[in-house]
Each structure stands twice: as C-alpha cells, then as structure tokens.
Image (cartoon, rainbow, N blue to C red):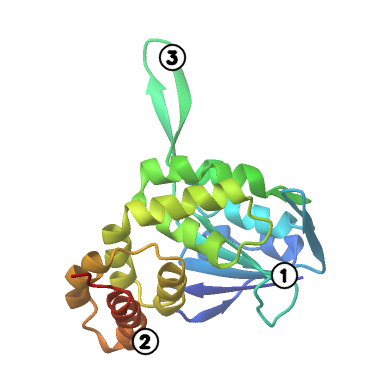
Amino acid sequence: MKMTGYDENNRLVRLPESLDEYYSGAAKRFAHITGVIFVPEEFEVSGGFARGDFGLLRAFLADHDRKITVRISRDKVLSGEDLVLFFPDFLYGFVEDTFARAIHHKIEGSGYACRECVGKREIRLREYDRLFGRVADDDMTAAFEMGMGRLLYPTDLAENNKAQMEAFMKENDLGLLDFLAREPDGAEERAAYLTEHELLDREHIGKALPMFSDTAHAQTVAALLAYVNKKRKRKRFVL
C-alpha cells in the first residue's frame, strides 16, 4: 500500500506505508496534513461497502482530529472510480463531574462519527453518506466538501443520497458559490458539475461573480458565464 499526504500549501508529504512504520513515530507530526491519497494493495466496492486493507488509514484518521480529505485509489494514476471522502474536524475532550467525582468523555462535531465508518477491513459507505445531513447541520462548508467529493466521484453512491446532496447544494447555492470563491483548488471541476446539473441560480451567479476576481478563478468564471449565457439563450418571448 502507499499513502501520500499534502499540507495547507498543497505540498506533497511522504507518509508511513505500514502500521509498524506509522506507530514507530509520533502521530502528531502529521497534524498539518489536510489531504491524503491512499492506494491500498487492492480493494473492491459493492453493496455500500469498500473492502480492503484500510488499517493504516483508520489509524491515521483516529489520530487526526482536523478536517481532512481522503482519496482512495486503485492505482497511483487517479481515476473517476476513486473514492473521495471528506472528514470534518472534531473536538475530543473531557468534562469533570465534581459531584460524581468522575471525568466524562466529550466529543463535539460530526467528524468523529464519519471516521467511525472506516474499519480495518471495510468502509461503510452507506453509513458515511447518511451522515451528510448531520454534517450539514453542524457546518455548511464541511457539507459542501463532503457532498462535492461524493457527487464528483459517485462510486457506489445511492440515488437517494445523491438526491439529498444535490438538493442541499441547490438550496444553498449562494453559500456554495462563496465557498468556491474561497477555495480555488478544484473549483473549476465543481462548477462544471453544478452547472451541468443546474444546481445554481443564474441571478445568484451574477451576485457572486465579483468574488471570483482572483486570476486563479479564470476557468471557473468561464464555466459560470457559459452557464448563465446558455440559460439566457433559452428564453422565449411571446407577443
């Protein structure tokens, strides 16, 4: 298996490629990682489960409480059959109960529940997808990340979960456009999907365009304008 990471500046970082190597060092040294490309020796997806050796990935996620995007691929060359899973951040702490003389565990955020979908030998995709509503209630930006990952790479994505994610995107398209403006990496691909499936309101695009002033957004703006102009051409005036 092979696992590669990248940090906030999109720089590649070599990660351990076995559990022995991972546990031989301090896990906290990888706290700056924001994304992972995980290539197991082999895995298969069917019936709402991805099956393979995910022990190293599970260990990494268990020690990483910040938000992180994981791309699981069959090969070093990425393809449309990959799995792209976003895991929100979470807070794991303790609360002291003075009267009971006890200390209780405290977990805040949906990121912990999402990570629990990853086992040593399987990833429960249906369970992960069902958590989308909970993630959306906690953090809209995290929901955008999670939903776009599954919609763009819909490996074994059930139709009802797809419909839920698309409905959320359409209902919150202004916030989604703001998210695309703040996250230029991958924005063009995301904009292409959103326009192709007509999940963006034309008037909302017009309001949001000034946010896409950075040159990094050139291709994204082109996709949005093409969609707006196409919608305008469809108009018919009847006298």
Nearest the camera: 65 or 223?
223
Residue in view at x 27 percent, y 76 percent: 232
Of the image marks 3 and 2, the number of the one nearer the N terminus: 3
Give the amino acid at mark 1. Answer: Glu
Residue 110 can be seen in this image? no
Classify 10 Å Cα crowding around label 3: few (below 14), some (14-19), many (20 and above): few
Residue 175 can be seen in this image? yes
Residue 91, image quadrant: top left
Look at discs 3 and 2 and give the one toward the viewer. Answer: 2
Give the amino acid at mark 3. Answer: Arg
Quadrant in which the C terminus is drawn: bottom left
Classify 10 Å Cα crowding around label 1: few (below 14), some (14-19), many (20 and above): some
Q: Which mark is residue 219?
A: 2
User: Pointers 3 and 1 in contact (CB under 8 A)?
Assistant: no
Residue at mark 2 to residue at mark 1: CA–CA distance: 36 Å
> Total marks drawn?
3
Q: Mark 3 points at which residue?
A: 101
Residue furthest to the top in view is 99
Q: Name the residue under label 1.
A: 17
Residue 28 location, x and y as percent? Answer: 52, 59
Give the amino acid at mark 2. Answer: Gln
Residue in view at x 79 percent, y 51 percent: 121
Residue at mark 3 to residue at mark 2: CA–CA distance: 59 Å
Look at discs 3 and 1 and give the one toward the viewer. Answer: 1
Residue 222, placed above or below residue 167: below
Residue 105 location, x and y as percent? Answer: 48, 29
Residue 91, placed above or below residue 53: above
Look at the numbered disc 3 and give the secondary structure of its residue. Answer: loop
Relative horizontal placement of residue 218, taking residue 133 as reference (left or right): left
Residue in view at x 65 percent, y 79 percent: 78
